[in-house]
Amino acid sequence: MSRSLRVLVWNEGVHERDDNPPGIGEYYPDGIHGAIAAGLRRLLPDAEVGTATLDDPEHGLTEEVLARTDVLLWWGHIAHDQVDDAVEARVRRHVLGGMGLLVLHSGHYAKVFTRLLGTTCSLAWRNDGQQELVWTVKPTHPVAEGVPSPLVIPEQEMYGELFDIPDPDDLVFISSFAGGEVFRSGVTFTRGRGRIFYFSPGDQDYPVYHHEDVQRVLANGVRWAAAPEGVDRAVPDVTNPGRTWR
């Protein structure tokens, strides 16, 4: 019998800790990570879903935790520089070895994402709370399964082009906003043996992670990013390319 999919939702947790924006606890009483994890547990009932934050020892991302994690979801915004470089390198080598990675919203500036992609990952933005329409442009991709097009998010921070990323393996979603901006809001990459999915909707100012269709995208992303059963993890040492852990 195949084992359960093991998923870890990581959130820096600073907004919730500092009540910034004021009232964030009203729609994320268990933190952004708690809302994401709840959606995954609902849609992936056979998965083991855990959470971790920046304030946990080693940010909750120890070697032991990562070794048993199939897919890591990463939400960060204002504390990217507080992520320890040694922990980031540990996460990065597990991705290269086959752990799936979902990078969410402002996580585009996370150290692990920019270092895996090798670009600044900068973008245009403004926060007017406008409607976002997420259009599916590759409906055959597993991440898009069961997702309406457009996926309508009533209020959301605007992310716009130019998004400084390498050409993605797959462009799954494009978003449009009332100001006329467009954004590549759902893209995939492969680095080493690891699958990476970036999905932009999900700002701390709005309860986007309670949106059922956003939750579906994330659940689909987890299933897609997990290494196929039977594929061994081969975890390299990013500080010593000749050394590998299995």
Image: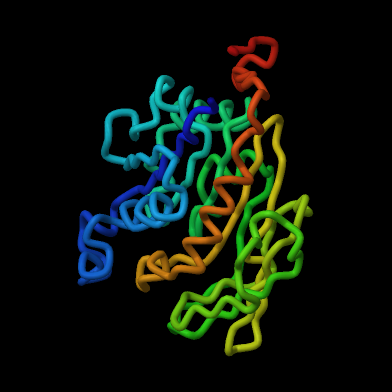
Q: Position of residue 48 (x, y in %)?
A: 40, 37
User: Who is closer to the viewer here, 240 or 38?
Assistant: 38
How many circles with numbers are drawn on the protein? 0
Residue 224 shown left or right of residue 20 in the figure: right
- Residue ID at (69%, 11%): 242
Query: Vertical placement of 155 versus 225: above or below?
Result: below
Could you tell me residue 110's position as x and y percent? 51, 47
Colour scheme shown = rainbow
Q: Quadrant of residue 36?
A: bottom left
* Residue at 34%, 33% in the rendered image: 60
Depth check, front residue: 13 or 39? 39
Q: Is residue 219 above or below residue 238?
A: below
Q: Residue at x 68, y 49 (%)?
A: 119
Rendered location of residue 130, percent (x, y): 48, 85
- Front residue of 194/166: it is 194
The image shows residue 238, relative to residue 166, as above or below, that is above
For the C terminus, give its image quadrant: top right
Q: Looking at the image, which residue sits at the far front?
A: 1
Side (left or right) of 16 relative to 93:
left
Residue 140: percent from left, percent from top: 76, 60
Specify whether 77 is left or right of 225. left
Dividing the picture into quadrants, the one containing residue 146 is bottom right
